[in-house]
Image (tube, grey):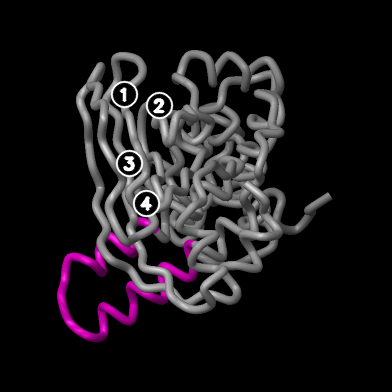
Amino acid sequence: MDKDKLIQSFSEGIFKVDDFFIISVQPFTKIYDNYTKPEVCGLVIPLKGKAVFTLKGEAHELEPGIVLHAGPSMELDKKVVGDGIWEFALLHYYVSGPKEVKEYLENLHGRLYLNPACYNDLMTLVKQLHQVRRSPGALNEFRSKTLLYSIMEHLLSHGMDKKKNSDEDTVKELVDYINNQYDRNITVLELSEMAGMDVKRFSYLFRKLMGECPKKYITGFKINRAKELLIHDTISVSEISSMIGIEDSLYFSRLFKKYTDYSPSSFRETFGKNPW
């Protein structure tokens, strides 16, 4: 897709949500001689698994990190790839405004690629839209429209028309994600899904690049952040535990001692007066 032309089209057009679904499909499912929905454009946002959507004879392999755009009434074949469940969000939207914008978007089919951290932010918007669409009313219609524009803005700001990331780049991006999201309970499964890999392969690549498994890296980063908070702040141990994404403060204390040989309170007492 021509990203510059896409940006111009979205800036000039007027859009409204038609419908929104989250759909799960069983492994090995195949559907041929189908068509996209008439009169509306659509975004296919993969959540889990892999599939191939063939639009007007052109095959598009889809997995988390790749978003597909399609116009109305396009010839469509679909098949699930591999033995896992294929799950995706399907967003249909109306286009109005200048004739050339409407014609361009209604004839457009292609993919945009997002790096894992940006794709995770997109998932947040998708979940919000799913929640809003479950309740009728004028206010939620307005919220739907706002979220549609937010999703489009995110795709246009962070999407790439070609996949540029190697596996090593993907792991590096997820290391940055861990470093910025240490206040959450991040799991290795979550990270592997963001990378579009199985857990075993992701863990192997992570260890190869970082010298330790992802779980140990996540915990180590949280503990190092807790050290900084214990030395430079007077907030309680339970508050620090919550700030690094560990809700059970007793578990945090045991973990902290395992990694440092100090309890959080004795670490503060020992090093708080001598940060050097």
Q: Which residue is mark 1?
A: 79
Gap between marks 3 and 4 measured at Cα: 31 Å
Q: Main secondary structure of the magenta part?
A: helix
User: Disc number at residue 88?
Assistant: 3
> In the rendered structure, which disc, 3 or 2, sits on the residue that comes first in sequence?
2
Residue at figure coordinates x 50%, y 45% from the top left: 109
Q: Mark 3, mark 4: which one is toward the viewer?
A: 3
Q: Secondary structure at mark 4?
A: loop
Choose top left, top right, bottom left or bottom right for residue 185.
Answer: top left
User: Disc number at residue 247?
Assistant: 4
Q: Is residue 139 magenta?
A: yes
Left or right: residue 62 compared with residue 153? left
Magenta residues, start to end = 126-151
Q: Is residue 76 magenta?
A: no
State if disc 1 and disc 3 touch (CB < 8 Å): no
Going by the numbered disc 2, the residue's amino acid type is: Val
Gap between marks 4 and 1 measured at Cα: 42 Å
Left or right: residue 11 compared with residue 16? right
Q: Secondary structure at mark 2?
A: strand
Instruction: Estimate the x, y position of residue 230 in percent, counting from the top left.
Output: 62, 56
